Image (cartoon, grey):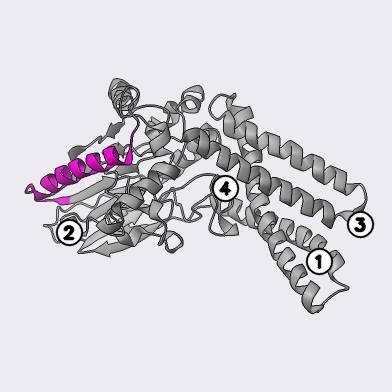
Amino acid sequence: MKIGFFVIAFSFTLLMVALVSLRGWQALQSVGSSRIWYLAANIILFITMLVGLMSRGSLPPTIGKVVTFIGFTYMIVMIYLLLSFLVVDIVRLANYFIHFAPAGMKVFRLWALVGTLGVVTIAMIIGNYKFNHPAIVNLNIKAEKPEQNKTLKIVAASDIHLGPSIDKGRLKKYVELINAQKPDIVLLAGDIADNATKPLIDQNMAEELRGIKTTLGVYAITGNHEYYGSSLATVQAELAEKAQSFPNITVLASGVSDVGGVRFIGCTLWTDYCLFGEQYLELAMVACATSLPDHKVIRVDGNTLFSPAIAREIHLQQKEWLRSKLDEPFEGKTVVVTHHAPAPASLHPMFEKDLVSTAFISDLTDMLGSAALHIHGHTHHSFDYDVRGTRVIANPMGYSKGAKIVSSPGELRRENANFNPQLVVEL
């Protein structure tokens, strides 16, 4: 299954690059030697992209960052050039039958190439500016609980995906932004690491994470990416073993902490694959098993793959555990932190008909209302809404520099352009 998925993905990428190279060659017909440079650049950049994808975590940090940046940027440019050339082909085909602009067709493809590269360049500059100049957002959370005569300032973030692209230097800037808010508590809702932990170790990112300054501590949960290339049992054991390396961080690997009169309940949550109803359960699990990396690169222990059935079983166990903790009497406010989303309102419209969305969100509406705040990650889109009196917030950064197909050119440098490392929640 894993080899088949790789062959299909590689074949599609190769076909896309070949078509864009061909159309670019044709577009530059009147520009002389630039065709050779265009073709050579495509070949070199394609090879660079492959090296970046196949050697993630194994290259030296500086080289890995450069190669990954070039490869992912090239992929994004190729996607938009492909879309542009397909539109050009449709217009040219229509012109063949209707003859509405016969004279202009010879240069139409060239202008489409130049225009697309210009738009993508501008979009990346804008995206880079937003990436490096986040705005501070303050959110006040109210709850039907007795006042504790104290306001807690919480900074919340998730899906940072530390690795070759989001390196130690970038992490240092995020830590500085977080510390500038002088938070009482920092909540990290999973996927702090990307596909491998080696870059984190090689760059000694623990040094920066230890630099997060709070009055009451940092509380984190595991996402799905923390387990990539390993097993649930191994990662959980490593977190327990290396806890002393992060004395300021408490991992709520299904855990509860009472801090400053506020109860924090955390778990990964996973999913029940029933976002669209139980009638689609089996289809959803098949779709996720086929296309979701979780079920190809995560093991439970030993050689047992982390299948959708196992993910659903763990979800149901954590759901009941979470329900029991919420039912326990508590005088102060409660904050729940999960990686996976707890309500359908966290479904972005672009994925509302995608069965794979069931791997990101479950419907826990009946359990919302007990907590003042529920923070989640995983969706790679920001959310802020209310369900039955519980404020649901997501502030994920998402993949960097277009590792996935983005929803708009403005998100080219970072999947979620609305990510804010200085998001402040006052509870």
Q: Secondary structure at mark 4?
A: loop
Q: Residue at x 78, y 75 (%)?
A: 97
Q: Secondary structure at mark 2?
A: helix
Q: Amino acid at mark 2?
A: Asp
Please tell me whether mark 1 sits on a helix, a strand or a loop: helix
Residue 393 at x, y = what percent?
33, 55
Q: Which residue is labeled 3 in the image?
A: 30
Q: Given this view, does label 4 or label 3 mark the residue nearer the observer?
A: 3
Q: Which residues are magenta?
A: 306-333
In front of the other: 337 or 18: 18
Whole-number angstrom distance, CA of label 3 to CA of label 2:
65 Å
Residue labelled with disc 1: 108
Q: Residue at x 73, y 56 (%)?
A: 117
- What is the CA distance from the residue labelled 2 to the residue labelled 4? 36 Å
Amino acid type assigned to the residue bearing label 1 in the image: Phe
Quadrant location of residue 127? bottom right
The earlier-in-sequence mark between 4 and 3 is 3
The residues tagged by marks 3 and 1 sit, at their Cα atoms, a distance apart of 12 Å
- Cα gap from disc 4 to disc 1, whole angstroms: 28 Å
